[in-house]
Image: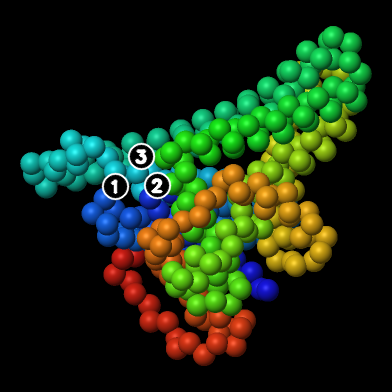
Amino acid sequence: MKSSNIGGQAVMEGVMMMNKDRYSVAVRRPDGEIEVKVEQHKPLTKHKGLLKVPILRGVFSFADSMIVGMSSLMYSASFYEDEEEKKKPATKEEEEQQKAKKEKTDRLMMYGTVTFSVVIAVVLFLMVPYFLSELLHKAGAGTTLTAVAEAFVRVALFLGYLAAISRMEDIQRVFMYHGAEHKCINCVEHGLELNVENVLKSSREHKRCGTSFLMYVIVISIIFFMFIRVDSPVLKIVIRLLLIPVIAGVSYEIIRLAGKSDNKLVNLISKPGLMLQHLTTREPDAEMAEVAIAAVEAVFDWRAYLNENFGYTYPAKTEKKEHEEP
């Protein structure tokens, strides 16, 4: 099976899909219609050489995905603002000023939210396990037992966090769209025509999922930190912070390999992440599948993919640009 190389995420009542340098956001509006926006992806770095360096490319990819993901999430949320916020200004000039102000505010909010999310993740999944294990060390536990305790706390926090948010009603709908996203990709990568029926019967597990990536981040961090043998508490914290990009880069390389290989060992390594996706995905309904299909078709020619990899003879796709943003 050849990877389609498309990927995405769920947003509020919709799906974002990315393919190479373009991404789309499809949202089911309150009136029931599907709104699709297509934009060019502007990566953090345009230096193609850096994006070919193993591990380093993973750092840039992770940062890019967070920024695009947050931007897509904010766009989808804009369809569900309070009616008071949707009232049009009196004049065209006021409308343009309001639009410019909103774009600036949204941009600042997006970068602020991304930064805040990273800080919270570092504190919760990196610092809290470390400080709790240090309490055990001060109580007389050996270095090995302290490292094992830190690993256990980190895994417990991660699983507890996923289990907790999966019970929230609003998040459950997001997880249903997450399932629709996976099912669309699996549908075309397994040689099926992209329609609602085929999407719904496809698997909601996928080896390139962000949930699997986060699991690898946790596991790789445990392995790395178990080999840190320094006495200074300050130096331990500094090393942990400096290793974050490396851990993200290594995790990306594993995900990248998993998405391109059906090797038995790779499939075995991927199993825990696939199992974990049962917490972060739900079975979507037909309307959600329609939204995900719209997101895929806006940036990916699945017919050409099936022609090339499965011997289909679909006619060439006719490009539609009326919904594309400059």
Horizontal side of 255 relative to 19 (left or right) equals right
Q: Nearer the viewer, residue 228 or 52?
A: 228
> Which residue is found at the position 27% from the left and 40% from the top?
81
Horizontal side of 204 relative to 274 (left or right) equals left
> Which residue is found at the position 50% from the left and 72% from the top?
198
Most distant residue in the top direction: 139
The reply to whether discs 2 and 1 touch (Cβ–Cβ < 8 Å) is yes
At label 2, the amino acid type is Met
Q: Which mark is residue 12?
A: 2
Residue that label 1 marks: 79
Residue 66 position in % (x across, y down): 53, 45
Mark whose residue sits in front, 2 or 3: 2
Residue 125 position in % (x across, y down): 66, 30
Q: Which mark is residue 106?
A: 3
> Which residue is found at the position 37% from the left and 60% from the top?
287
At label 1, the amino acid type is Phe
Q: Which badge, 3 or 1, is on the more N-terminal residue? A: 1
Element on which disc 1 rests: helix
Residue 55 position in % (x across, y down): 73, 50
